[in-house]
Amino acid sequence: MSTDLYDLLTERAFPVRWVDSVPAGDRPEAVSLRELFLRAHEISALAVSLPPALSGLYRVLYALTARITELDIADDWHEERFDVLDAGAFATERVDAYFEAFPDRFRLYDPVHPFLQDPRLTSQCDKSAGINKLVTTRPSGSNHAWFEHTADARPVALASAQALEHLLVWRYYGPSGRCSARSVGGVKEANCVAGPLRTALSYHPLGGTLFETLLAGLPEPDRARRYVREGDPCPWERSEPTDPLTLKGVVTGPMSKLVGHNQHALLLVPDDLGAHAVDAYITWAYRERIARTDDFLIWQTSQAGNRYARYADCRRGLWRDLDALLLSDPPGVDSSRPDVFPTAVDLFEQGVFRIQALGIDQEGQAKDTQVVSSTTPPVLHLMEERDEERARMVGQLRLAGERYGQRLERAAKQAWAQFANTKVQDCAWSAAAAARYWPEAETEFWKRLDEGCFDGAARAFRARAERIYDHITEAAAGTARGARARESARIELYGGRGKKKSAGAQRPSVGEDR
């Protein structure tokens, strides 16, 4: 294999799962990029094992879908998207026409146009970063091991298909901070800002096939201005790379927002056969920060009025985000659902519509805690556009579950503080309460949602909180001090004592659920 190839149009670099109707002898474990589009209607889902890589890959495939179907320049976007859906598959002639227009742009190790990479880094960087730095699940330098034990002195080559996955992770989720020094036009810097999706949780509509999923995930173009394809190129469509010292011409429309919004520049170094990556350059792509805009994030507003994307949290179940995906204005929080969801709902009259959440629980800089991946059951019938009343009931169900989780946490902290004569803070009791309550609350939530039973939900969540509180504080109840602390803090399960009121005002009883 020539080192300038590993052509994604022919190499089977994308693992997939097939629909049941596909014959057993015609189900390769992975497909090439061309096969992926030609057989998207036979593929049930992508089988990429690294959630942030899948999140990045979706965005690349959305952009390619828009180009192949020409929906990026459609006069009547909604109607023409329905026409593509009714066809049942991507048109072979359109798939071939698009990829034949860029025959050398999907090669992972091409010397002139390496896919989603910058070939200038060999001359602009002082040194490479090493293959361990590329692999986000490997420790590099003096960092602690995460998923595997490797050493920079004994680097292990990475299969090219896996190298592509980690390339995507870096482009979308790369950290801020120190990086390899890069010199451009007299400017030499060795630091970068975080990738556009770092710390955020990305939400994607899932259809019954990859064909449906890609159509559902297409953001609707802005019809306020006439869209010109040439003015909004994807990175692989550019004849010349962008200028690292300016953001002019970097993000100019919906396609470059999907795939050109990156803060890290990378270049993979192949082995002699081109089957593996053995090294990588990783550095800054632009000196300025590109404004974070994305159609697949839940956006929230802080008390200070700042807009931010909902964080990926490995301890937080997807059920706690569900109403923020079903409703345009969910109860109890100032947030807005991903922009892609209203148009995704329109695409399906009936059938499967699920939601997949992808990301990494991480800090803005180097620390990554855990990858996050979760998928809901079919929820099309619960979307606000289909059944607003029931969607709002889902919001109330979520509120009830979270209310008693928060009250249980406060009660556990208060009880421990009184028992141990210390300040109210995270403690063994609050950790044990959270570990038991949230899985139970999730079970209760999905059970009630599946049965359509919303009456009595608050009592059910409260009963679980009470039982867990009794369990975690039971060992201390045998002493007078422990018993006093336990019973004194119990009121937090019912909303606390509240503020003092003026004379004559009625005060709710201890057991009242406020």
Image (spheres, rainbow, N blue to C red):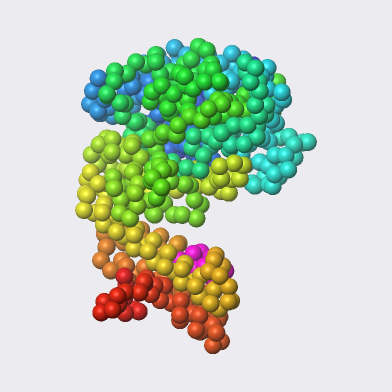
Q: Residue at x 47, y 47 (%)?
A: 311
Q: Camera-side residue: 375 or 92?
A: 375
How far from the left and from the top, in percent, is residue 424?
53, 69
Q: Camera-side residue: 460 or 395?
A: 395
Image quarter for residue 182?
A: top right
Image quarter for residue 2?
A: top right
* Residue 237 in the image: above or below residue 492: above
* Residue 197 in the image: above or below residue 332: above
Q: Is residue 254 visible?
A: yes
Left or right: 237 in relation to 376: right
How far from the left and from the top, in percent, is residue 145?
68, 47
How far from the left and from the top, in percent, is residue 94?
36, 17
Q: Camera-side residue: 176 or 18?
A: 176
Residue that extends furthest to the right in the rendered view of this protein: 153
Does the stretch in magenta take in 431?
A: yes
Quadrant location, the C terminus: bottom left
Q: Residue at x 55, y 78 (%)?
A: 419
* Residue 48 in the image: above or below residue 325: above
Image quarter for residue 341?
A: top left
Which secondary structure type mostly characterizes the magenta part of the structure?
helix
How many marks are shown on the rendered structure?
Answer: 0
Instruction: Give the residues drawn in magenta, as a range.
Output: 428-437
Q: Residue at x 46, y 68 (%)?
A: 410
Q: Residue at x 28, y 79 (%)?
A: 503
